[in-house]
Amino acid sequence: MNYISKLIIATITVLIAAPVNAYETADEWYNHGKQTLKQALENVHNKKHAKNVILFVGDGMGVSTVTAARILEGQRRGEAGEENVMSFEKLPYIGLAKTYNTNQQTPDSAGTMTAMMSGIKTKAGVMGVDQTVIRADCASSLGKSVPTLLEQAEEAGLSTGVVSTARLTHATPAATYAHTPERNWEDDNDTPASEIAAGCKDIASQLIDFNFGNGIEVAMGGGRSSFMPNTETDPETGVHQGERLDGRDLTMEWTEKYPNSAYVWNKAQFDAIDPNTTDHLLGLFNRSHMEYNHDNPQDLGGEPTIAEMTGKAIDILQKNEKGFFLMVESGRIDHAHHAGNAFRALDDTIAFAEAVSIAMDKTNVRDTLIIVTADHSHVFTIAGYPTRGNPILGKVVSNDSSGDSSGIETLADDGFPYATLGYTNGQGFGTSGDMRTIGRQDLTMVDTTLEGFHQEALVPLGSETHAGEDVAIYAGGPSAHLFHNTVEQNYVYHVMRFALKRKLGW
Amino acid sequence: MLLVASGYSIAAETICVDDATTFGVSYTTDWQLSGHEKEPARIHNHETNKKTVDLEFFAKTGKVAYLLPEKNVAEAWIKQPKNQLVFLRAFPDENRGIEYTYGDLLSLNVNLQWEQVKRPFLPLQIAKLELLDESVDQCGKLETRKGIVNGQKTIVTWYPELDIVKYRLVNDKNFRVETRLSGWKNKAESLASFDKITAMPTMDFADIGDNEADPFVAKMIRQGFVAHVHADGNVSYPGGHQH
Ligand SMILES: [Zn+2]
C-alpha cells in the first residue's frame, strides 16, 4: 500500500498534471486551494505507536535548495516547474528547525546530526558527545558520550540501518553510531597516535566494533579506504591503497562478526544481494564519497543510486517484526554547494526525493514515521524576476510591462545577464581562473544550465559556506503531527523517541 | 602520442634516462616582462620584472608529478582505469595535500585527458608545430619546432620519443619566457620523489568546505590554491601556465 493516501495524491495532481501553465485557470487555482483546505480538515493525527522510523537527511538541503530542485524536477518532465511537488513535500506535516550549534551560529553537520540523533545540541565538529568536550581533545571527551537513537533502537531489538552517499565515516552517518571529539578521525591514519593512546577510537572501527543489540543490519555508502589496511590496494581504482595503519581489514571483520552477512563494493555485487537471505549488509561503493548522482554512470565499479540503496535497506530491515530505524543521508548536496555547482546539488536533491518516494512505496503510513529534513542550509539563492517556467538553471528572462515574458535576457546594471541561481560566497565563476582578480563575467555566451557551470558568488571564497537560517522538517506517519512549529533541531530526536516509546520506553 | 615504454634506446654512456617509464627532469625558466603589462600580483613579486623559476617533473607509469620547490607546491596527476584522472596538490613544507577525485574535478568543470597532463609544456600542441630541424644528442633524437601555442610565438627543441622539452622560448610582445632542461633524474630518484609527494596526508577537495576551521585549509583557501586547478594541467609558473 502506498504511504500517502489516494486523497492527497488526487488533490495534488490537479496542478502537477498540467503541462506548463497554459491550461491553468482561475477555477483551477481556486479549487486547488479548496482541495488543499479539505485535505487539511480531513487530516487526522496519527497517534499510534510507530513500528518503524526513517530519518532522511539532505545534507545542506536548505529551503531554497528544495524550491530550486522542485522546479528542476518539474522542468525535466517538460512542465513549468514551479507547481511541481516533490515526494517529501507530500508529507502532511512540516516544521522548522533552528540549526545552530552550541558554539556556532552557522552550524556544521557533526553538531547538527548529533542534535537529531542524540537529543542534545552540541559543538560543531564533534559527534555523539556533549558540548563540554574540547574539539579534537580525546581526554576531554571521555565519559561525555551521549546515546544515539540508533543504539537505543538496537538495544530494544529493532533492526537498524545507515545509508549515505558520503563516506559512512562522514559526520552525518557517523553521528548515528560513533562518539568522537573530532569528525575527521575517520580512520586510525587520521587520528593522532596520542589521541588513540588517550582512549579514542577512529570512526570506521566504531562502526565495525558497534556492540548494541545484535549489531547494525545495514550500512551502505562510501569511504572504503578507511576500512582497508594500507597494505591493500583498492579493488576499484587499482592505484590507491587503504588508509588503515593498524592492519585491520574491517570489511572482512564485518562478515566474520555477523551471521548471514555480506560485504559488497560495486553495483553488480549489490544487485546480487538477496534481502531474504542477507541479515547484515555492508556496502562501501567508493574509496571516498560516492559519486554525485549525475556522475553515477561514470563510476568505475558501478554504484547503486540512493533510491536503490534505500529500497534494499528497507527490504532487509523490515524482515524484523519488531520494526526498524533507518537513517538515509544525501551527503553530496552539501559538497556540490560547497563547490558552487548548483547543477549537481539540485540533481542530488532530486535523487534524494526519489529515495524518499521508494521508502513511501515500501512502508505503511499507519506504522512508519518518515521524517525528511536537512542538517543545515547553504548560502544559495533564487534571485531576480524570472518569468514563469524560466529554466531554473538558466539566466533571468523577466516579463515585459504587460506581464508576459520579454523573451530576452534581463541585464544587470553592469550590462551583463545574470543567472537565477547564485551564492552569497564561494568559487563564483570558477572556470575563469582566480576569481579574486576577475569579478563578474559577461554570461551572454555562457550556458549556465550546463553541468560544469559554477553559479556566481558575491564574496570570493575557495569554498562556498553553510548558511544559518532554519531548515524544514517534513513528516508523515505516527507522531508526525508533533512537527508543527519552529523547534530546536534536537527536538527531532525526541519525536522519533516518542514515536518508538512502546519499544524504547519513555 | 603514447609514451614509448620500450624500444627507446640511449647512448650507453649517458645518464639521461635509465628507464623511459620512470624518470625525472629539472627545468629552469627565465621569465621577463618586456612590455607595459604588469605581472599578475597573485603569483609574482611586484618588485621585479625578471624571475627565474625552477620546475622538477617526474614521470612514472600512469602518474606524473610537477614540483615547484620555491613555491612549496607539488602537483600530481594519477590515471585510474577508463582514463579517469585524480589530481593531487601537495604542500611539502606543510606535509599536507588536497586530493581532487575524478568527481571533484568534474564538479569543478575540469575534464582533462591523461594526454593533456602527462608532460609539461603542452606536448600535444608542440607536436603540431612546424618542424624546423632534427638532430641527436646524448639523450636521444631531437626535433626543433616553431609556431603559435595558445596565441604565443614559440620555439621548442624536444625529445619527441619522450615528449620532453629540452629548450623552449616563448616570445610575446609583453614577455619573454626561456626554459632550459637543466638535469635528469634517474629511476630511483624519481620514485623517491613520487613517494614523498604521494605519501602526504591528504584531504578530499569535497571535504574542504566542512573544514574551514583547519588552519591548513584556511591558509590554502586564502592563497587561492584550493580553487585553482589549471585547465591545461600545468602548474602555475610562468610560461607553463597558459589558458
Ligand atoms: Zn558542508
Image (cartoon, coloured by chain):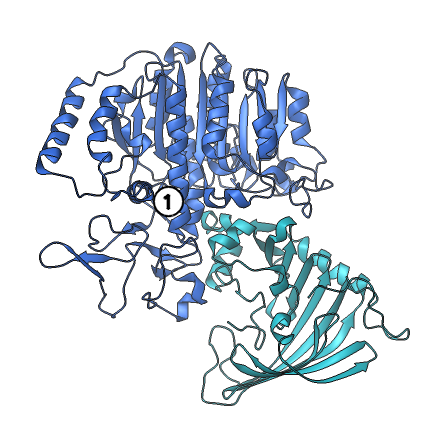
Residue at 42 percent of width and 27 percent of height: A117
Give x and y (percent) for residue A281. 58, 24
Chain A colour as displayed: blue
Q: Which residue is mark 1?
A: A346
Above or below, A322 relative to B79: above
Give x and y (percent) for residue B115. 63, 63
State the cyan chain: B
> Does residue A78 appear to the left or right of A293 in the view shown?
left
Please identify the residue farthest to the right as the structure is shown: B12
Q: Which residue is more in the foreground, A306 or A107?
A: A306
Q: Amino acid at mark 1?
A: Leu
Does residue A205 show up? no
> Does residue B69 appear to the left or right of A176 in the view shown?
right
Give x and y (percent) for residue A438. 39, 70
Residue at 54 percent of width and 46 percent of height: A298
Residue at 41 percent of width and 26 percent of height: A358
Disc 1 crowd rating (10 Å Cα; few below 14, some 14-19, many 20+) is: many
Q: Secondary structure at mark 1?
A: helix
Q: Which residue is more in the foreground, A282 or A273?
A: A273
Q: Which residue is more in the foreground, B47 or A131?
A: B47
Tell me how many marks there are.
Answer: 1
> Does residue A355 appear to the left or right of A182 in the view shown?
left
Which chain is mark 1 on?
A
